[in-house]
Every structure is written in structure tokens, then in C-alpha cells.
Amino acid sequence: MLQQVNGHSSGSEAQGGGFLREDLQEFLSGEAPLHQLDDLTKVNPVTLETVLRCLQARYAADTFYTNAGCTLVALNPFKPIPQLYSTALMREYHAAPQPQKLKPHIFMVGEQTYRNVKSLIEPVNQSIIVSGESGAGKTWTSRCLMKFYAVVAASPTSWESHKIAERIEQRILNSNPVMEAFGNACTLRNNNSSRFGKFIQLQLNRAQQMTGAAVQTYLLEKTRVACQASSERNFHIFYQVLAGLLHLGNIRFADSEDESQPCQLMGDAKCSIRTSASLLQLPEDPLLETLQIRTIRAGRQQQVFRKPCSRAECDTRRDCLAKLVYARLFDWLVSVINSSICADPDSWTTFIGLLDVYGFESFPNNSLEQLCINYANEKLQQHFVAHYLKAQQEEYTVEGLEWSFVNYQDNQTCLDLIEGSPISICSLINEECRLNRPSSAAQLQTRIERALAGNPCLGHNKLSQEPSFIVVHYAGPVQYHTAGLVEKNKDPVPPELNRLLQQSWDPLLKVLFPTDPEEQPSGQSRAPVLTVVSKFKASLEQLLQVLHSTTPHYIRCIKPNSQGQAHIFLQEQVLSQLEACGLVETIHISAAGFPIRISHQNFVERYELLRRLHARTSSGPHSPSPDEQHSEGSPCTEAATLQPLLQDILHTLPALSQAAATLSDPAEATPAPVCCGRTKVFMTDSMLELLEHGRAQVLEQCARCIQRGWRRHWHRKQERQRQAAVLIQAAIRSWLTRKHVQRLHTAATVIKRAWKRWRIGMAFLASKELDDVEEKHVSPVPLSTGSCLLPQTQSSLLAAIIRLWPLGLVLANASVGVQGFRRKLVVWACLQLPTGSHSSHNVQTAQEQAGITSIRALPQGSIKFHCRKSPLPYADICPEPSPYSVTGFNQILLERHSLGHA
């Protein structure tokens, strides 16, 4: 395990980096699916090495977010990825029914907090704690979360609400560059390191719409204005705007030969003080006099004594003036931002807090600033431990679970060393300030080592040549130098500096340093001045009270390398950060514990359906349902009545596990761990998935049963409707058929009547024509039968002619069929002509000669033929009339020469 002292790793562990790199290469080449693990609790075994391999595999695949139980691990990509933070992706996570099933992302954490606020489950207020080393991406993460809330917390239907959210979003985002310019600086680890803590409160109304915001800052590093470490820079604003504070830094004092005389300026310092006075709009002489001479009031008469300051005191007063002006300016800037984005207290009911604090720091030269920063990180780590790790294990004990406790890293001993009562590092430093005596660095080191020698988190570097002490933090040991600790903790502000700045003509300085008419010039009437440590501790306690009143969410930012370059993953640096944030302990608790907790009543109400899967014996009593329980007994007996139901449900788990194993892996037939406590049921994520799968199966069976019943009912209804339709159709078809037959019968009757009338008429006409015809071509017939034979023959011939002359006409004029002599025989047979000499009866057809000869009579000479119209409709119409065919029964053409020939 890496051990870090003053920011440098030991040589033996650095030599092991090559072996670790080779081991990782072998692992990554052999386990390609490792980058697909979205949760570090799924790696096996859960160790620093396996977690590191998973993170490196995902980082190589450009996957920068990974879950670790209740914590989100964010790797800094060190390159722009616009599609990873687009508005479309924000809306996708916001519109998802179950965002936790999507890929891990900071938007998933943001959506979870927003839905918790909408659910109104206590505690309603939410907070997101973004922690990590300097340069790990905490500020960028907070900025993206604010953009996400501005998008999702605006009403899509209300244009006014949308404009308010856009205005607040724009002001918050526009305030970030200003605050970063005044509060960020270039350090050894980060070119844009936040040198102050920031808690942003996003205010929501009852409709969960963003109505305002507020910014609260903590522990601005004012000493950076006066001095910076080697290879570090001042705040960014000094490289963008040339304000009078920079010229104050060019004022140099020389040692005075006479203690009764003030120190004189060195070199071009007089020009610098003139420029500073001009920019700050202060009188030049009072400014120089305030830096050189100290005013003391003593005695009952409050006599004023003026004492020249030494060179060191002059430098301290100069630096104090610069820090005082800059601190007031930064506070004024924050107040201006809050006044533009903060909503009326009556217009918002809930909030979501974003905490962006400085990460754990360890430099070659660590002083009071690093002690306060690391102290804040220790408190936040304890908050995490108290909220998740310790609270989880204590709940298991209260519920009576047989829980194998994990020895997590508790930092309470370190906190007792820093802030404990009655004696701690902070109390000793404050005591040195209250004594108001010169304190050497060695003397402070000796007091700390003697008073706190029994604390295991206190160490000493015997090889160090400067007075210092070592504090073993949860993230590693850090060596603090005692030189200057007491002076920085006092943060003295001489009253004459305040009175000097109140004389400024600058409008901004007049706002920053207003004149107080009730201010007493006497130093004895003033309230005790709070030290830097005391003020920081008070503000930190106030912040923790806010965090304890909310539901916290954690995002751990990891920096893959200190160079800020993309696609570079340095195992040693990442390992130290994993240890620093206690990530492995978190994963151990999450993987081995029971993150899902459901009350007995809610568990029975949701999973009572699983009792259908349990094979119940016929003699076993039926357990009552939850509704029956409420009606049967009092709340005292509710727990007892729920136990049989719980046992019935739990008895289905082996069957569910077996069914799930047969579908996946038979070796996984062992039931997932689940424990039934006194008031709650504890289970893992896998058990929850198993129960939900079984519940879905039961619901599917019920749905299928309902569907079968509905389909049966529907089919029966359809069959009845079909039979009714068939019956109706049959009746209609029968009625239509009867009507059609009736119409045909009526038409046939009409045709028959017309045909009979026409036939009678034609018979009458034929008989009338035959009355005058003499039978000249009749064959000789013997008269043995008597004189009545001739009339009988004539009557039968007349009847045949009347009855069958149309048929003979048709056969005589047909274009196809029998030809020649056979045709004549057919005609004779049809006409029932008397047999005899064929030569005496000549019947001519249309095929033999042009024209048609009438078969009714063979008159001699010219006759006048009258054509009468047929009584049948359309009897004289043919679809395709032919000039060589007869087009109607009444169209009989008689040719004179043919008749004459006949």
C-alpha cells in the first residue's frame, strides 16, 4: 500500500509500479469484459487492485463514470466531450422511467435527487457532496449539475417559469467565471484550483420549479494575496485586472537604526505607495503612517500612544491591509451574486444543495490553510461514514441481524486530535493566540507533542530540520510546519486600518468599509476577536447541520494523472486517491451488506402474490391477507400476524432461485441472502431482482388467466354474433330468393300469356291465309276409308302447320347443323308432313337460294304481305344482326320468282 509523506511516494513502492503496470496489462488482456462493469461492487474480489483494474479498463474505453454502491466515481477525462453533457442527454435521463438502469452519470445522481424532492419523502431537501483532490474535476461537475437542474426544473408548459429558470441558470453560470477569477489560483496540482469552499443552494417551489439560488462560501485563502508558495500563482483576477493591492505588495521597508523612529521605505517603494494611494483613493501620508506606526490606547483615560513598528510588523500590517480589502471585496461579490439570483423566502419550499469543497492537500510546505482544508475533508469523511457505513451497521444490530462487520476506516481519532475537547491542536493554537505573547515555532511544536502524545494519529519527523508535526489523516500522513501558525490564526486587523479605509473616496470601498457611528475607539470595549480556526470551525459546523438535515449523495472525483493529459492513467496516483476517499471500504459494505430495506407491511403488500408459487398443503391453514389483518386485530398484533405471511413469501425464494438458475447458470441455485429483521426485511440487489422477477411471473400468470377468460368471453360473444348474423343473412337471402322467384314467376306468367295471345293470333292469321290455298301437290291417297278422310288430313296438316311452323323456320334458316337431304328430313319430320313423293313437295331454304320462302302457303301470283309487330318486347332485336339471317319471327320475305318456281 502506498504511503505518502509531504506529497512524495516512497522509493520501494515506486519500484513496484512497473510490476503493477505489467500485471494490469496481463489482466486487461485476459479480462476484456471488465470495462462493462457499471458498479464496482460487482468486481470479485473487492480489493484496491481489482477496483483499479476496472477503473483503468473503463477509462481506456472512454467510460468515465462508475457506480460504487451509493457513491458515483467520476474520472477526469482531461479532454472536451460535448456529447457527454449535451442537453439531449439531460432530457434522456430526466424522461427515463428508471434512470438507475441507464449508464452511470452525474445526471443520474441529479435526476435521483430531483425525484426525491418530488416524492416529498423526508428528508425532502437533498444535497450532493462533490469531493476529490485538487484538479479532479469537482468544479466542472458542480457546473454540469447546475446546468442539469436548470434544464429539468423548468416548467415545460409555463413560459414565465421557463424564463425564470433560464435567467437563474444564466446568472449562476455567469457568476462561476467571476467567482473563479477571484477565488481560484494556479497551484502545484491544479491550474484552476478553488481556494475557497462553496455551497450552492438551488431553491425550488412547491411545483419543483427552480425559483432562485444562493451561494455560501467557506475559508477563502486570503494569505495567497500576500504570499504564494514556490511555482504557484496569485488569484486569477490579479492577472486580468491591475487593482491597488498589487502595488501594496511592492512596498518594502528597511530596518530602522533607531527604535523610536519608524522604518523608512526602500528603493522605489515611495512610487508604489503613491500609486496604491491613488488607486485606493486614500490620502498618501495617512496610508504610510498607518503602516509604519501603531496606535495604543491604555489607562483609564484611554491615553493614546504612538509606537513605531518594526520591519516585520510593517510587513504584517501591509499584508493585513491587502488581505482585509480582498476578503471584503470577495464577500461583497458573493452578496451581489446572491442578491441577483436569490428568491423570496416565501416563494420556495425545498432546495438541492451542491457542495464543492477543496480536496485533500499535501504539499512540501503545509501551514494553517492546509490544516483547515484537511480538517474539513476529515469532517466530510466522517459525515459519509456516519451516514452510510456506521448507520448501516448499527441498523443491522438494532434489527437483530447476524452481520459480519467490516473494519472500515474510522477517522474519529484524527478528528479528536484536531478539534477534540478539552485539548487538541486547534485549542492549543487558539490558546497561543489568546496569551498575546511572542510564540516560537519550536515552543508550539513542543506543546503539541507533550499534550497530545497519546493520540496514535500524531507523529513526528525526526529528520525534519524545521519545527513541525505530522497528522495521520484518513487520506495519509501530512507534515505541518509550525512557523507562522499562530500569526495566521490571529489574523489581526488593527483598528487604525479600518479607520483608514473608511476615509477612502472610492465608492466601492465606502460600501465595503461603512462608517459605524456607534463604534468605540477604545480597544477594551471591543468583543473578543475570533481566530481563523474558530470562525472556520463554526462555519463548518453550520454546513454539517445543513447536510445532516438533507438526504446526501456522494460523487468522488478521481484525477488519473497530475499532468492534466488525456488517455494517461497513472496507477500510483489513482491508488492513493482511492485510499484517500475510503472507496474500498464503501464497496465492501455495499457488496457484503444489505442496501435494500423494506418494512414488513410494505414487503407483504408488494410480494404477497408470490404465495401463489408456494405449494401449500391441504391441511395447512390459510394465512390472512393484509386487509384481514387490519380488520382482525390491533396494531400490537400486526407484527405477529405479518410473520406467517412473511414466512410464506420467504419459502418461495428457493423455488425462485432454482428457476432463475435453470435459466442462467445451474451453479447459481443458492438463494441470495435475505434477512428478516424485527421491523424490516433486508436484502441485496440480486434478491430484489429475484423477487421482482417472481412477482412479474405471478402477474404474468394472472394476466394470462385474465386474458384467457377475456378471450373465451370474446370468442363466445363473437360466435353468438356470428350465428345471429348467419341467421339474419339466411333469412334475408331466403326473402330475397322468394322475391326473386316471385318476380321470375310473374315475368314468366306475363311472357306465357303474351306468347299464348301471340300464338293464337298467328294461328288465326295462318288459318286465314290457308283458307284460300288449294292443295295441288297432295299425293294420291286411296279412298278406301271413305269421303271423310280428306278433311281429317287437312285438319291434321293445319294443326301441324299452326303448331310447328316457327321451328321449321328456324331449322330451315340455321347457318350450322344438318345440311342437305338430312336437313330436309328433319324439316319434314318436325312439320309432320305426309309421306309420299318427295318430288311433289319442294321446300327451299336460305342456303339454297337467296331470300326466304314462306312455309305457310304457296300462293300463285303476286301477293301483298303484311308484317305485324310481335307482342313480345325485344323479340325483333338481335345483338349482332346478320344480313343473311332472320332477325324476327315476323320478318318473312317472299320473292316472286321463288313463289312462281314453287
Image: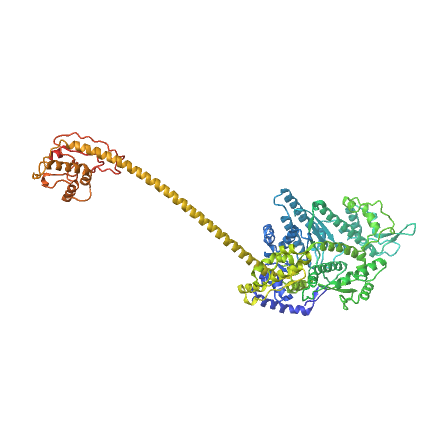
- Looking at the picture, tell me which residue is in the foreground, 836 or 1: 836
Q: Is residue 217 left or right of residue 864?
A: right
Q: Residue at x 74, y 57 (%)?
A: 228
Left or right of residue 43: residue 831: left
Q: Residue at x 26, y 38 (%)?
A: 879
Query: Percent position (x, y) of residue 511?
Result: 78, 45
Q: How many marks?
A: 0
Q: Give x and y (percent) for residue 709.
A: 50, 53
Can residue 598 be seen in this snapshot?
A: no
Which residue is nearer to you in this view: 15 or 198?
198
Quadrant in which the N terminus appears: bottom right
- Residue 336, percent from left and from top: 73, 46
Image quarter (top left, top right, bottom left or bottom right) of the C terminus: top left
What color scheme is it? rainbow
Q: Is residue 91 above or below residue 832?
A: below
Return the x and y of residue 49 as percentages of the image width and height: 63, 66
Residue 173 visible here: yes
Residue 699 falls in which quadrant of the image?
bottom right
In the displayed structure, would residue 370 be above or below residue 828?
Answer: below
Relative height, residue 125 to residue 741 (above, below)? below
Locate residue 731 relative to residue 888 in the image: left or right.
Answer: right
Nearer the observer, 302 or 673? 673
Front residue of 237 and 401: 401
